[in-house]
Amino acid sequence: MTRLPARRRPCPRMSRCAWPLLRRLPARAGLALRHGGGAAAPSRARPATAASSSASSSSSASSGNGGASRAPDTSLFVPVPLKPGLGGAAEEDVGAELTRPLDKVLKNLNKFYKRKEIQRLGAENGLDARLFHQAFISFRKYIMESSSVSADLHIILNDICCGAGHVDDLFPFFLRHAKQIFPMLDCMDDLRKISDLRLPPNWYPDARAIQRKIIFHAGPTNSGKTYHAIQRFLSAKSGIYCGPLKLLAHEIFQKSNDANVPCDLVTGEERVFANEDGRQAPHVACTIEMCSTNTPYEVAVIDEIQMIRDPARGWAWTRALLGLCAEEIHVCGEPAAIDLVTELMYTTGEEVEVRNYERLTPLTVLDYALESLDNLRPGDCIVCFSKNDIYSVSRQIEARGLECAVIYGSLPPGTKLEQAKKFNDPDDPCKILVATDAIGMGLNLCIRRIIFNSIVKPTVNEKGEKEIDSITTSQALQIAGRAGRFGSSFKQGEVTTMHRDDLAQLKEILSDAVPPVKAAGLHPTPEQIEMFAYHLPDATLSNLIDIFVSLSQVDGMYFVCNIDDFKFLADMIQHIPLNLRSRYVFCTAPLNRKEPFVCTTLLKFARQFSRNEPLTFDWLCRHTKWPLAVPKNIKELVHLEAVHDVFDLYLWLSYRFMDMFPDAVLVRDIQKKLDDIIQIGVCNITKLIRASQSAAAPGTAEAVSEDFPLSRTQKDARVVSERHGAASTEALSVAVEAAGLRRAKNSRPSRLGSRQEDVKSYGRGSLANRLLREGLLTQEMLRQLESEWQDQHRNGRYGFGSKRDDQHSSKETRKKRK
């Protein structure tokens, strides 16, 4: 029992029957707080949780870098709402019966908030300035809006109001309230231990139980490094191939079975067994996310190991490298990853044998750019980083009487293979390929010359932020290396650019050394998130992930992968009642969050799943409006690609919730039919482009996708638009193209003849007439261009002038619009 100090007399109106109650109150242990003493606040019991010490000074018990743990990002701590007491219970009225109704409470609460000693005590208990303020606002609201508070708090408040107590005596109750709305304060040590990612090798005890031999096959594209690893894979009694793409896994699956080595295929959406009776074959080819870390193998092959640094998928390579149970691990990739792999294997006590390979065929960077599509030759591949550039270039090629194949990332794998087959076929009239960097891996192509239409592309950095920058040396080498493939009809590869201005920069990029891979990706596991949820049951999954990453500790060889896509899906389905494990699975579904139709379908899947209603084949057909017709324009082709992704999503979920997605076989059948329909559309892509442009309203053009950077002409047009306030970016694009022709005339006299021939061969007559015929320019846009040109001519401005002139021109244009 704590004896009350003499000065602490209760209010005269206080009933004598309150004394036995007061002697049992734990809050009385904190009466001397203002003298520097501390007290443990009353709190509800939590399993496996110790009383929280300072959140800023607590450190993880696990070893690693040995430093103190960093302070958590408290902006991620979402307060749990507490409802004020509504009265009605007998116990809740005890305080008022023993004392009197409270008054002057708000004044004393504000005095409590301003006390420096209280703020210091809050900081010692994990409440930084932000959390302290939020906790106080909630505490004050709880007291002021409650018709009755607990008896012990009521008595303390009454003492303070009567002058018999001190505002510091509220701290234990305030801290108890703070831990109720911020439960993570009470279990910070446990959360830090769960999110300690400094020793990933320990996550895989089966792999640590054996002594593995690591062989690194290092070399550039087309050096035979993967070939040698696959030969060892085929000769082993059992093996697993882990690749970054379904196309690569399918290629190894076919090659293995063709060599009479039974091999299964495992991807996120597909399981194919080599044995008709469904027995598991000793060999398996899979996408890297699907590899098993529990099954023992004699040989494992991990392809494209440099992707261990990928901001989104790097965790899968880390998991395979550290966790595969194989006597031999054959790692294939760029030499830039050798040092990191060696360091990672040093932590597991395993040595790395490095085998270096040189390119099998020569690759030459040409000294001249293509400059005109008239200079195309059979075996050329134009690489674009924009769908809009794909459409534009393919149509211009067709206008020259040439046929081209088209490959880009969102096409189904079957369509990509058919387009590659068409391009590779020596008897097919299609001799030109227009593609994105999707050709960088996964497709065997007979390319003689790689032509970069642009050398800038969008990327996502470690923070998940989208950037548009020049391609990296690694990306340029990966793409350029597709030219002159060993075993193809071209014994030498060539690489150049479409524009002369880009050629010098491309040479510089290709000549630079590939920067070493410095860190391997990690990702929270479902088990770790479940443990987090046990301690924070009221937090959303998105908030759990945020807090996990905020508290996570990694050493210098690792980083936590970007989780924006995961959080996007978690927020999207948060309102749907799902258990944590199912919610986690839905949030890891592989989809492009910029495809509204696919995201909407996932939402409907989750809602139907939560009602325990199976998603049948008939339901899916109604949702996708199957059967679908051959596309008539680009918009319909894009929609068909989205429907194909929906079928992929269904198949992906069917292997995780077989009872709720029961019709995988039927869905796979219609997906193959849809693939055929998309192939027809891609083969007629130039017709679809023309149909889309003719259907567009006059003076408008198809919107530029946010996923891709603007082409050179479009970027120039954007600058002009900003400077001159023009209403039509398309019109200005034409003006910039014309300006480009004028610059070419002045700066490249040696190319004047070929440029003029280019204009004549592409369409007779003036540039304006040609653009009018193609639908790229309307009469209204032509009049606007003429008017702007005359205004500039009258002002004596033939080019871009000062900022002041630009602003004046913009004002004049706005006046005309009004």
Image (cartoon, rainbow, N blue to C red):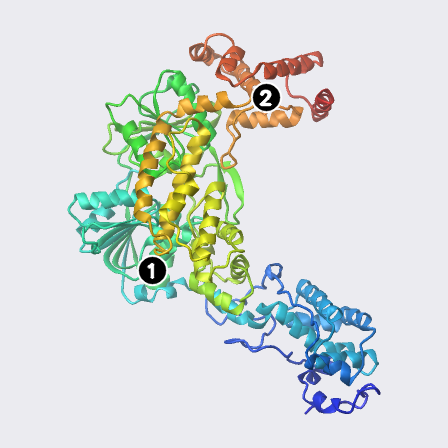
Circle 2: is it few (<14), some (14-19), or many (20+) Cα within 10 Å?
many
**Residue 348: horizontal and vertical position, in percent?**
34, 63
Find numbered disc 1 in the image and state the secondary structure of the residue it sits on: helix
Residue 496 or residue 180, whichever sits in front? 180
The residue lying at 59 percent from left, 28 percent from top is 718
Against 84, residue 407 (above or below) is above
In the displayed structure image, the side of residue 594 where residue 487 appears, left or right:
left
x then y, percent, for residue 166: 79, 79
| Quarter placement of the C terminus | top right
Residue 231 rendering spot, x and y as whole percentages: 20, 47
Relative placement, left or right, of 467 versus 287 is right
User: Is 416 in front, or is 88?
Assistant: 88
Say if residue 76 shows up in the picture.
Answer: yes
Instruction: Indicate which label's residue lies in the foreground, 1 or 2.
Output: 2
Q: Give me the disc on residue 732.
A: 2
Quadrant containing the N terminus is bottom right
Could you tell me the amino acid type at mark 1? Gly
- Residue matched to label 1: 323
Secondary structure state at the residue bearing disc 2: helix
Q: Is residue 213 above or below residue 99?
A: above
Q: Residue sitting at 44 percent across and 31 percent down?
A: 636
Under mark 2, the amino acid is Leu
Q: How many marks?
A: 2
Classify 452 as above or below 578: above
CA gap, disc 1 and disc 2: 56 Å
Q: Residues within 10 Å of mark 1 (few under 14, many from 20)?
A: many
The residue shown at (44%, 35%) is 639
**Mark found first going from the N terminus, 1 or 2:** 1
Identify the mark at residue 456; answer none if there is no mark.
Answer: none
Instruction: Answer yes or no: is residue 362 visible.
Output: no
